[in-house]
Amino acid sequence: MTTVEEMRGTIQSIADISNYIRGGRGRFTMESQVTGKRLTYQVHSPKKQYVLKDRPLWITFLNGQNEYQFLGTIWVNSLSNLMTFALGKNSKLTLESPCVKGITWLIGRINIKRELPKEMLFWHEGICCRCGRPLTVPESILRGMGPFCSTM
């Protein structure tokens, strides 16, 4: 049986990365091929459906103690489809924290539809970013979303 670790894959298209984050259940790592540094994040969509112009996605990051720590909220504008990031009110992090810089950099690239440099890898964990099920179809692994969820 194939493990989730074996099913991990990279997503290369900025449009697919955007869709992966918007899926609301993704876990991903950005890895610099230049420095070797990695930042791992997890996106959570609130169970409550908000009737707002902007849809919230909560984002956490993997701290050095193997625990996910709340980072802030990504707001997805339903009209323009642009994303903005806001630090959590009780966050001990600053805009200069590497994990905050990483997510704001990524959101900036998504908003201007600019592809990642070849030195930056975007890894997902082999699970669908919408439903959380393991991905088994090669095309699904490439985009990080299962065949049924990609049609929703």
Image: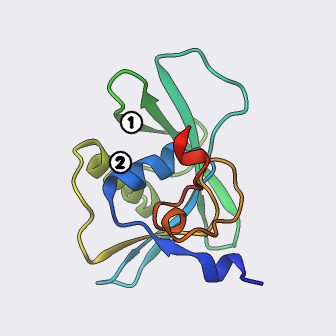
Residue displayed at 69% across by 75% down: 4
Picture coordinates of residue 138 (x, y %)?
52, 71
Mark before the other along the chain sequence, 1 or 2: 1
Residue displayed at 61% across by 77% down: 7
In this orientation, which residue lies closer to the viewer: 119 or 39? 119
Horizontal side, residue 105 vs residue 91: left or right: left
Number of labelled discs? 2
Q: Is residue 93 above or below residue 86?
A: below
- Give SS at disc 1: strand
Three-letter amino acid code of the residue under disc 2: Ile
Q: Which residue is mark 1?
A: 84
Q: Which residue is mark 2?
A: 107
* Quarter containing the C terminus: top right
- Residue 134 numbered tag: none
Q: Alpha-carbon neighbours of circle 1 within 10 Å: few (<14), some, or many (≥20)?
A: some
Three-letter amino acid code of the residue under disc 1: Thr
Horizontal side, residue 152 vs residue 100: left or right: right
In this orientation, which residue lies closer to the viewer: 56 or 113? 113
Picture coordinates of residue 101 (x, y %)?
37, 56
Horizontal side, residue 79 vs residue 124: left or right: left
